[in-house]
Image: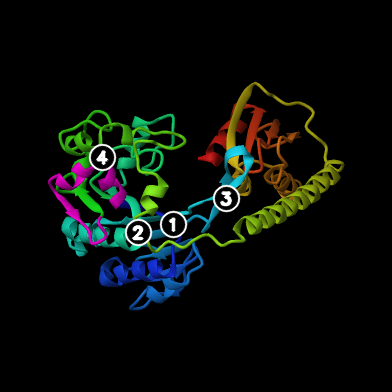
Amino acid sequence: MLSIIFFGVGNLTVSKRTALGEVFDAHPVLRPARIGDDPPRTIVGDSIVSHLAAPKLPLWLIGAPNRQEEEATWFIDLSPEWQAVEGPGGAKQVVRATSRLALFVGPERARAAGGPDGLAGFFAELGDALGASYGCIFPEGFYDKLDAWYPDVQCRPDPREGLGSVYWLQYFGPAFADRYPGLRDLPLTMTTARGATVYRATDRPEHTLKPDGGPLEGDWREPLVSVLGEKPFHFDSSENAALPSDEEHASHDPNSESAPVDLLERLDREARERDERRAREYTRAHDRRLQLERRRVPPAEVDTSQEWSTNFDSDQIQRFWKALRSCLAPDITGPYAGALSREMANAPRESTGKVLLGSAHGAFVLSWWAEDEESLTVAVHGPRAVIRCFERAVD
C-alpha cells in the first residue's frame, strides 16, 4: 500500500474543501464511494463535492463500495479550526490551525489511476487544492524503516519538526522554494499551478524500500539532500528552524480567513465548560468506586515481583480497559472496573491513586498518576502472567 500524507496551514475554508472534492471527482478511480464516521454509511455517488463542502470532520472515506478493500481508505484529519497557545508573559495568542490529509492506496487502484505518472498528477492537484505546506508518498513498509532509524521518537514526516527522510514523491509548498531556490532545478520535478514543487526521487515507489544505510543515504536521496542540506530532515521536538515557518507558508495562502474577534473568549469558555464536566465525572466515578469498594473482598496476598508501566492519553483509558476484559477477571470487569476506568480517565492534574485487584492470573496492584488533564501514567505490580495481559492489551 502507498501512504499519502499532506499538511496544510490556515483554515480549511469551504472553497478549499470544494476544490478537494473536485480533485477527487476528476480522478474517479481514487474517489471514495462512501463517506461519514467510522463506519461510513453515506453513499457518495458521482460527486463528492457536496459532501466535502460542509462536512463535520474528521471523516472516514472508504474507496470501495464495502469495507473489505482496505487498500483504498482515506482519513481526513483536521485539528480544530483555530487554536490558542500561551505566548510571552503567559498571555494567550492565536496560532494558525493545521490540517492533515492522509490516504492509503493499494497497488491495484494505483495502477488503475495511471501508475506513477497518474499518481503524481493526482498528488500535485490534491496538494494545490488543500493549499498544502508539505506532502509525501511512500510505501507503507517505509514506516518500519522510520521506526528503525528513529527508535526513540515517533518519527513521521512533519513540516514543523522534521521531514525524517527522502520519500518517493514529495510536495513542497511555495515557501520551500523561497527558502531553497534550487528545488525547482532538480531533475524529475514539476512546478504546480500554485507554485509548489513536486519532486520524484525515484522512478517507482518500491525502489525506496531497497536496502540502504541511514535515512539520508543512497544515491537516489543525494540530489534532494544536496539542495536542502541535512538539517530539515532532523527532528526537533519544538520547531525545526531549517524548515519554513507557519507564517511563511501562510503568506502563500491568500484564501485563509482571519480568526474570529471573539475567539479567545469562546475558547476560554469552552475550556471552562470542559473542565467542569470533567470534574463532575471524576467526582461521580470516584464516589461510585468507593461505594463499591466497601462491598469487595480484596485479595489477601499479591505477588508484586514484576513491574510494568506506560503513559496514556486520557481518551485512551476506556479502550484500554475494554482490551483487558477478555483476559483479566473478576475485578477488571463489572461496575467496579467501569467506575475505576472513568475515575482514571478524568483524574485531575497531579492526582494519584492505587487499588489492589484480583484476577484469574493472580492479584496485582494498579496505580496511576495524572501529570495533567491530557495524560496519565499507569503502573502495575504483579505476577508475570498479569504483566503479559497488560502488554497484550496495550499492543
| Residue at image mark 3 | 84
Taking the image as shown, residue 216 lies to the left or right of residue 263, namely left
| Residue at image mark 1 | 10
Q: What numbered label is drawn on residue 131? A: 2
Structural distance between the alpha carbons of marks 4 and 2: 21 Å
Depth order, front residue of 284/183: 183
In the rendered image, residue 236, in percent from the top left (x then y), is placed at 42, 33
What's under tag 2, amino acid-wise? Gly
Structural distance between the alpha carbons of marks 2 and 3: 22 Å
Place residue 310 in its image quadrant. Answer: top right
Tell me, yes or no, whether the two marked residues, 2 and 1, touch with CB atoms within 8 Å.
yes
The residue furthest left is 187
The residue furthest bottom is 46
Residue at 46 percent of width and 60 percent of height: 11
- Dot 2 falls on a residue whose secondary structure is loop
Place residue 208 in its image quadrant. Answer: top left
Residue at 23 percent of width and 40 percent of height: 209
Taking the image as shown, residue 105 lies to the left or right of residue 314, namely left
What's under tag 3, amino acid-wise? Ala
Q: Is tag 3's residue or tag 4's residue first in the polypeptide sequence? A: 3
What's under tag 1, amino acid-wise? Gly
Depth order, front residue of 78/40: 78
Assess disc 2: are there few (<14), some (14-19) or many (≥20) residues with their C-alpha within 10 Å of its C-alpha: many
**Residue range corresponding to the magenta coloring:** 173-195
What's under tag 4, amino acid-wise? Val
| Residue at image mark 4 | 166
